[in-house]
């Protein structure tokens, strides 16, 4: 009797290797969300990373972050939303789901990407604000 499930492939040396995962080329929701959230707050994250690497001082990073955030925060947020939307469209096209029916079928994935983007933005905002208070 043969089962429907395929067993892992045995090779000559006796080791058992699992089947390679099949990739459909789609983007995971967590990557889409992280990209959108990170780009949305790159105005503050960039100077913070430079300060943590020792490239600039904490005071310089704080000044750069404040200047960028005060003058261009909405531009960065808009860029984050546009990145999120673009990556969702790319993911839907890779799954051949670029229609109303496809969006409805993938709505949980789209909403999870949006939620991850918001959580990423909030976490990075809290972290950069806390580091700014220490500078």
Image: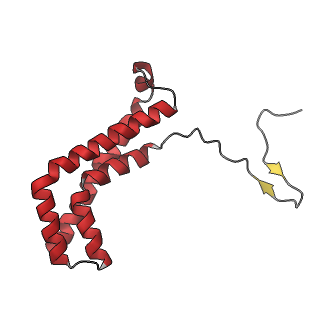
Q: Residue at x 24, y 55 (%)?
A: 41
Query: In this rendering, is residue 48 above or below 74?
Result: below
Q: Position of residue 80 (x, y in %)?
A: 28, 46
Query: In this rendering, is residue 105 above or below 3?
Result: above
Position of residue 6 in the picture relative to residue 96 (left or right): right
Q: Residue at x 33, y 43 (%)?
A: 83
Q: Position of residue 49 (x, y in %)?
A: 29, 69
Given residues 94 and 22, the one toward you in this image is: 94
Position of residue 26 in the picture relative to residue 135 (left or right): right
Q: Is residue 135 visible?
A: no
Q: Quadrant of residue 82?
A: top left
The C terminus: image quadrant: bottom left
Colouring mode (rainbow / by chain / secondary structure / one colour): secondary structure
Q: Quadrant of residue 70?
A: bottom left
Q: Quadrant of residue 113?
A: top left
Q: Position of residue 95 (x, y in %)?
A: 52, 31
Position of residue 77 in the picture relative to residue 99 (left or right): left
Given residues 45 and 119, the one toward you in this image is: 45
Q: Is residue 22 visible?
A: yes
Q: Residue at x 31, y 54 (%)?
A: 38
Q: Position of residue 42 (x, y in %)?
A: 26, 58
């Amino acid at each position: 009797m043969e089962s429907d499930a395929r067993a892992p492939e045995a090779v000559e040396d006796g080791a058992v290797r699992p089947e390679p995962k099949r990739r459909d080329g789609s983007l995971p929701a967590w990557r889409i969300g992280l990209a959108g959230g990170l780009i949305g707050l790159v105005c503050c994250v960039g100077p913070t990373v430079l300060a943590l690497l020792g490239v600039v001082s904490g005071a310089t990073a704080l000044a750069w972050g404040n200047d960028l955030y005060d003058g261009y925060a909405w531009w960065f947020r808009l860029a984050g939303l546009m990145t999120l939307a673009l990556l969702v469209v790319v993911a839907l096209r890779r799954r051949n789901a670029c229609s109303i029916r496809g969006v409805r079928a993938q709505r949980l994935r789209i909403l999870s990407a949006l939620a991850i983007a918001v959580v990423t933005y909030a976490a990075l905002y809290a972290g950069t604000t806390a580091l700014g208070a220490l500078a």
